Image (tube, helix red, strand yellow):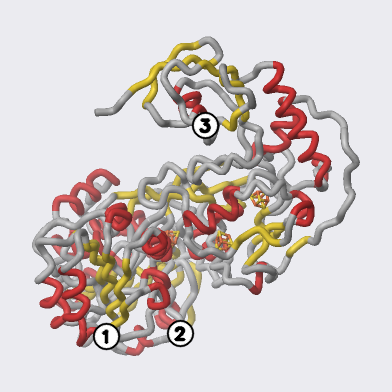
Amino acid sequence: MTTMVTITIDGQEISVKAGITVLQAAREADIYIPTLCEHPALSPAGACRICVVEVLGQRNLQSSCTFPVTDGMKIETESKRVVGARKLVLDMIFSERNHFCPYCEMSGSCELQDMGYRYRVDHWVFPTYTKAYPLDASHKYYLMEHNRCILCGRCIRACNELVANHTLGLGQRGSKSVVSADGSNPLGESSCISCGTCVQVCPTGALFYKRSAFMGKDSLTEKIKSTCNRCSIGCGTEVITRGGNVLRIMGDWEAPVNRGLLCRMGRFDLLYDNRRRITAPLLRTEGKLEEISWEKAIQTLARQIGAVKGSEIGVLAGSYSSNEALYLIKKLFNQELKVSNIGLTNAPAPRVFAKAQGKLDNIAESDIILVVGCDPLKDQPVISFIIKRAVDKGARLIVVDDKENGLAPFAFMTVGMADIGKAVEVAGRANSPFVLYGADITKAAEEALKKLEDKIKYVRVESGVNTVAATALGLNNGYNPAALKLIYVLLGEQKCEDDDLSRTISKNAFVVVQASYSSPLTERADLVLPAAIWSEHNSTLTNIEGRVQKITKAVEPAGRSKADWEALKLLSIELGKNIAVSEDKASAEVIKSL
Ligand code: SF4
Ligand code: SF4
Ligand code: SF4
């Protein structure tokens, strides 16, 4: 049973759980206490002394972020003594390094500046600019401006506690202290994995993104909640836009799957994709791809489909296809046009266990983590953060893989597939083992893992982004390009750098490729339909836990691009089927078959 205590904050009596901090209690009662080194996702540090409060009976002011409540406690959050102490702290912070706000990227979005206004810090009390610190511009994606750093330690705690990467620490001592990477490396030459979490938690202009530097403070931008579509986790994002352009991507602290974290792919790669966009429908005319209208493109496609039998059509769905597009493929191609030759560009992982999957959150409660035939560090990095965090807290990791695996350096045991029996034996002795397995698992390893079924929680880790939905809808019955007369490839944003896929296609087949970027496959195509990218359309994806997650349009599509499902919807109308599709309809169809 939860023990409650009664406390009084600023004259307001409230009942809260025993043992929580004064800051947590104040927040529950909507009473504001200013903070700087504190961040809700991080452990409290009590370092900056901005959140001090007066607790009746205590001689000294107490840091509210670390001080626990007790029954009958009386607290003042803005007494004269408290305000004086905060002002002194601010005077010292502002004087210590260079906080000349007009020249700072974060001016207008800085927690220290906000605090300065709140407590009327309008001049320097102590000597300032006494020492110049270097600017570390060595990292590809962000800058470290030590002159703006207030040594709050948020970045260090984020790198250690959330990402478990342990790159950042405090270098040197006393007034010479600086945030440092791997002791003393420039960030760009350090063990940093470019997740950007440190930048996201920094309260000042000490850490900021290169790409969006000086392009707009928060009040000039729009923030749109969306989902990263770079892997099968589907991390929640906040897409920051200004004037129709995406400036940066932040992790959504409220998203249950990633709780604010993103990896390099989701935070940076999306914005640094310099492949050539396809912005208009293209039809091969006299050997060359020529721009045409959408109307003509869809009419041409419908005519080509009408000229062949269902058995002569093949469909290949790319990893990025939305729930809505996959739903339309099933309804239009499979059910209406009787196309059975449908496959996926990514091999799905097999179903090993009869029981339902667990959640990624269960990893934190496990004592043994078995990673079999998948490499989350490379392919689903936020899962690797969760695993490394669990390892930091004492869980033991076993990697079973025949390939080089990014998680191997963190494992206490690494074996090949043929030796999975040894891993199963160790996991069998654990209290709460957790298994993550992927498409590279062998048949023999599947059988070995089944022995753990009663004991484990597990998640099937798909290498394709929306493979969960594609397989739930039954869209993987063996695509075989031989002897096909018409092939529809829903490539979307997927990379297709070699021409392996095009080599499998017969010379005489009419090839339609719906794609965002130019590739060897679009060069082979007879008809190319321009596909909108992650920031340009509304749709849904289903992640490896079976969560349906929403991609929200943040900017207008490039040129005449359309969402994958919009093109299929137009085709269904042209073919006289007019298949109704909506996010709810498509998602319900996926969920019922999971
Ligand atoms: S980007 Fe990520 S890994 Fe690199 S220093 Fe920051 S938190 Fe650590
Ligand atoms: S870089 Fe930012 S988050 Fe890190 S200690 Fe300095 S001010 Fe705090
Ligand atoms: S882990 Fe996957 S979904 Fe999350 S940010 Fe990285 S690529 Fe995107």
Position of residue 482 measured from the top left corner of the image (x, y, whole percent)? 22, 87
Spatial separation of the CA atoms under disc 3 and disc 2 = 75 Å
Q: Is residue 324 visible?
A: no
Query: Which of the two labelled residues, at mark 3 and mark 2, occupies the earlier sequence position?
Result: 3
Discs 3, 2 touching: Cβ within 8 Å: no
**Are there few (<14), some (14-19), or many (20+) residues within 10 Å of tag 2?**
few
Name the residue type under label 3: Phe
At label 3, counting other C-alpha atoms closer than 10 Å, the crowd grade (few under 14, some 14-19, many 20 or more) is some
Q: Nearer the viewer, residue 80 or 200?
A: 80
| Mark 1, secondary structure of its residue | loop
Q: Nearer the viewer, residue 49 or 162?
A: 49
Q: Position of residue 508 (x, y in %)?
A: 30, 87
Give the residue displayed 40% in from the left and 50% down from the top.
Answer: 551
Q: Which residue is mark 1?
A: 416
Judged left or right of residue 94, residue 509 is: left
Which residue does the numbered mark 3 point to in the structure image? 67
**Residue at position x 87%, y 33% in the image:** 125
Q: Position of residue 471 (x, y in %)?
A: 20, 65
Query: Residue 379 lies in what quarter of the image?
Result: bottom left
Looking at the rendering, in which quadrant would you find the N terminus?
top left
Point 70% across, 32% down: residue: 114
Q: Quadrant of residue 464?
A: bottom left
Question: Which residue corresponds to mark 2?
Answer: 287
